Image (cartoon, helix red, strand yellow):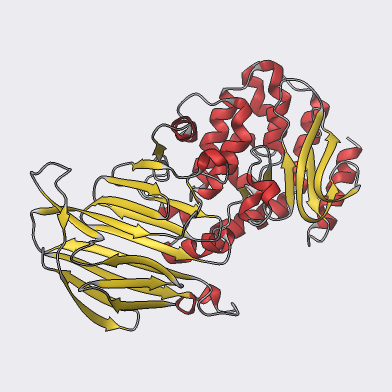
Amino acid sequence: MISFENWKQGFLVTVAGQRLLWHSAKRPAVFVHRAGEMRSAWRSAGTCLPTMASGRSALFRFSSGLDMREELRDARSVAAFADYSSAYSTAIFSLYFSSLDKEIDSVRLRFHDMPKVHWNGLGPREQHLARGTVALPLGARSAAFAMDGRFILCSSSGERKLRFGEAEMLFDLDLPAEVHFGYARTPAEACRLWRYSFGSLDSFLENPDESHRGVHSGTSQTLIAAAARAHSVVIPQEAAGLLGSLSFSGAGPEDYQQLNMAVAQAVREGSIWKYANLMLCQPDIALPAQFRREIGNAFISLGDILPARLKNRYAKIRAGLEKYWEFCRMRWTEDGIPALLHPSLLYPQDVALESRDDLLMAGADMVFAPNLKEKGELASLVLPEGEWVHFWTSRIYPSGRVTVHAPAGAPALFYRAESEYSWLFDSVRQVASRL
């Protein structure tokens, strides 16, 4: 799983068969910066003396005064992973940097990643691929996920900049600093690994408003990051994509709630039904309190009073799904799998889902496509693998592209036929059809 080798008067670190970091006197991978100098004045950390503390921990002391401590934690150290077939199916490789020389205030790291790897920032869409420089907020934490189940997380006492290139990543971090690489079989397992390694999502995020935001220079990521803060202008038609993207960012429940609030505030009166449908299908934990249960009441202040019959229908549906919403909440708080997520998180091998920005999943058993277009009552979506039951008609659909009628009050909503909650979904459908 992990090995350390002497290499050209330096060292080579290999994790999961991947040459992650190599360093030598002629080709350094670790650089340092001294206080008071220009930021461009990076110099090699110098030669190093490795000391093995154990089979999974080592200390590298560089001649410049920089210390690099590394640790490997695998699934056997996490009780929740005890039933995994392979003890090394999930692991975190961590590097901790500090300096004995008080003048050394920053470190630059050059990691050599796999060719053509796709690292994602806030989500799986093409515009979310990590390119160029990513500047991270002061004192906050952030992560990037790869679709093969890996993630990178770094924290620092000060400024952090990440640069993603072809098979290479370059990090500039103020000291003291940490870099963590998570290895899992799927993005969903990476979420669990992240959850159990760094505590609950709420406690992990030092500042829920800012902690997972990054701005990719020169791309639309600037707009997406601003919208995700829920304090800027939100483009309503991008609501589904923004909400789904949060599931790849390590966001906590408050982040979803804030973005939902911003979406509601941006709703135009003519489209209010479409956004009421968007709220209808979301688990309670992802919604602001005023959108729960009787969703219709939340929109009165926006200038459109919903008919009492449909307000009652919405309330009955949400109340009937309470057991499932609780299941979604438990899975989020205990396993780290968001209650509202992009389907690529659970189906990373389905290429048809990767580019969709109009699909969301409520837990693992419900998928919906909020119709946010200005006109029309038809919704087209791609269903993941398996068989899915149309919530409003009980018709069973196979995986793949489908188009269904999705008028106001009846969004394109499906539940997994094999779900243990299928009885609940069907009973709620029967109640809703009589209202």
Can residue 257 be seen by looking at this rendering? yes
Rendering quarter of residue 419: bottom right
**Frontmost residue, 108 versus 292:** 108
Q: Residue at x 40, y 37 (%)?
A: 215
Relative to 150, is 12 above or below?
Answer: below
Q: Residue at x 64, y 28 (%)?
A: 298
Q: In this image, 396 relative to 102: left or right? A: right
Q: How many badges with numbers are in the image? A: 0
Q: In this image, 60 relative to 241: left or right? A: left
Relative to 41, is 435 above or below?
Answer: above
Q: Position of residue 206 (x, y in %)?
A: 36, 49
Q: Position of residue 69 (x, y in %)?
A: 25, 70
Q: Position of residue 191 (x, y in %)?
A: 53, 59
**Frontmost residue, 47 versus 260:** 47
Rendering quarter of residue 10: bottom left
Q: In this image, 266 relative to 294: left or right? A: left
Q: Quadrant of the N terminus?
A: bottom left
Q: Residue at x 43, y 43 (%)?
A: 131
Q: Quadrant of the C terminus?
A: top right
Q: In this image, 359 relative to 379: left or right? A: left
Relative to 258, is 273 above or below?
Answer: above
